[in-house]
Image (cartoon, grey):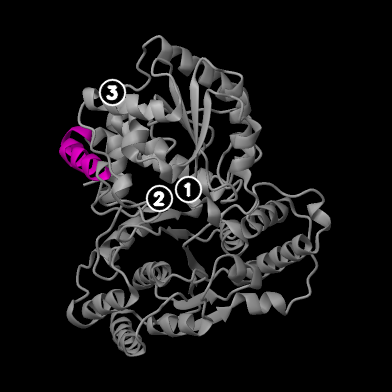
Amino acid sequence: MWLNANDKELQVFLDSAAVYWEKNLPRPAGDAVVLVEAFHQDIRVTLRNLACANAIRRLRPARLVVLTGVEQQWQRTLWSGFDVEVVRKVATAFGADEVIDVWDRVRGSETPARDDDFLVANTDATYCRLAKVPRLPEGYRDRPDYRLRHAYATRLFDIYQQMVAPGTVEALVTSHVDYDQWGLAVEAARRAGVPIIHTQQTGCLKAYGLFPAADTGTGTFREELTRQIGEVFETQVWPRRAELRASAELVAWRAKVNLGRPSWWRGGVTASVDLNNPAERARLRSHVVGRLGFDTERPIVTVFNHAVSDALGTNRELFPSLADWFADTAAYAAEHPEAQWLFLDHPSQALYDSTGFFDSVAATHRKARHLAFRPSATLSKNALWSLTDLGVTVRGSVSNELPAYGIPVIQAGWSEWSACGLSTVVDDRETYFKTLDQSITAIRDGADLVTEEQVRRARLWLWLYRSGSDVVTPLVPQWEVWPADVLLKTMRATFRHIEADADPLFSAVERMWTRQEPMLTRTDFRA
């Protein structure tokens, strides 16, 4: 685990946590189990999982079983300092009855790979992520590293299915729902009718839930979640838009100046926006357009590339891969000089691509003067927002951010907010390119592609994401409480000096659990 903390501080934290949870959890009387994964090396991720799991255990007394371990390729690609023994200590302090090294069991199995469609799709996505490639390489099925990945997926899935088979698992709590070590556990839980709580790596405590009664089984976990989040937004948030307007406007302003940003968004002065009126935007636009060699009179479409190997195929998408979407959009743009096209790479692409994919697409179109390719970090948000007339993405966060400030966005796939009416979400590739055509024509004709309602909806989404569904509890310090020694001292103070009565963690989880709602909420939306 990534926990560069003072040894003494860590031990005091562990002792304090152990006493707190021993006194605040009921003892399980039967065979009930809550499963929690601890595969991520950042302690802040694991702490969120454990806190949610213990809140469930207060409602449903159960043994706590923690799943952990590290596999060589995961360690080589992502985990620089994963320590199973530290995980074991932290889990035990939070009341774990058993800590299982899942990867140790996988390595000890000799089960051969199975060509189950789901296992193959999961293997493909995991392989791309760990190899940091945008697409599967030619002849990949015969590669030893792919065959090993496929066998690992088969063994993992068997292990997870055996764990949930007895019917005693009350819940699975997980920080991720993709790739082999997380995604296969999620699929096993869904097939066994086990509720899944999906914690988020941002804010104080954010979590989504998928309960068996609400799971249609017709799509991936993320597809199910998108539909259910849209329903909550439509029935419980949008009808209260008048009373929430002041709060939504404040959150929109804080988002504009980069306060309260999600943990994965870039920080610093280049990530804030201080354009106050159309005149300021026009002046900056003229300058930035000149830098790019563009014409101020023609529309500018900004295409936001994704982390190209990230969670492939885990929500509804129109193209076979994120790379296919990006390359095909660039090819389309090259044939459409009636607009100018700015292609931006993902700011963390180095963590997801080892092939130079973005540069290769840029090189293919280097003679097209109406196309420009730039790393995201080379343009400030001030510059980006001043020149963008239309944003294009598959599932990126710009599809909820840009509409909040009057900039239209087309999505070639689903994100968690895609059913909330913020952006234009298209259903197939033919419609995607047709919508691009129509949007460019409309902009050239002076039409406004964003309605006032979309702006209001986008700002309400910002409020929901950053406030309404972010539970503030001293048991889970805000994500920015860091480095590790500061985090541990903060939590130690909670365990030693704050009573558990009416803690928001427990009331929010109880509300979500008993009503089987798809998200934690700071307050009771139905009140």
- For disc 3, the neighbor class at 10 Å (few under 14, some 14 to 19, many from 20) is some
The answer to if 46 sits in the magenta stretch is: no
- For disc 1, the neighbor class at 10 Å (few under 14, some 14 to 19, many from 20) is some
Judging by the rendered image, the residue that carries numbered circle 2 is: 518
Foreground mark, 1 or 3? Answer: 3
Which residues are the magenta region? 241-255
Residue 8 position within the rendered picture, expressed as x and y whole percent measured from the top left:
32, 90
Do the numbered discs 2 and 1 sit on residues whose CB atoms are within 8 Å? Answer: yes
Foreground mark, 2 or 1? Answer: 2
Do the numbered discs 2 and 3 sit on residues whose CB atoms are within 8 Å? Answer: no
Mark toward the start of the polypeptide (2 vs 1): 1
Q: Is residue 292 visible?
A: yes
Judging by the rendered image, the residue that carries numbered circle 3 is: 282
Mark toward the start of the polypeptide (1 vs 3): 1
Report the amino acid beneath label 2: Pro
For the point 65% across and 50% down, the residue is: 355
The answer to if 250 sits in the magenta stretch is: yes
Judging by the rendered image, the residue that carries numbered circle 1 is: 214
Do the numbered discs 1 and 3 sit on residues whose CB atoms are within 8 Å? Answer: no
- Between the residue at mark 1 and the residue at mark 3, the CA separation in whole angstroms equals 48 Å
Given residues 456 and 335, the one toward you in this image is 335
Foreground mark, 2 or 3? Answer: 3
Report the amino acid beneath label 1: Ala
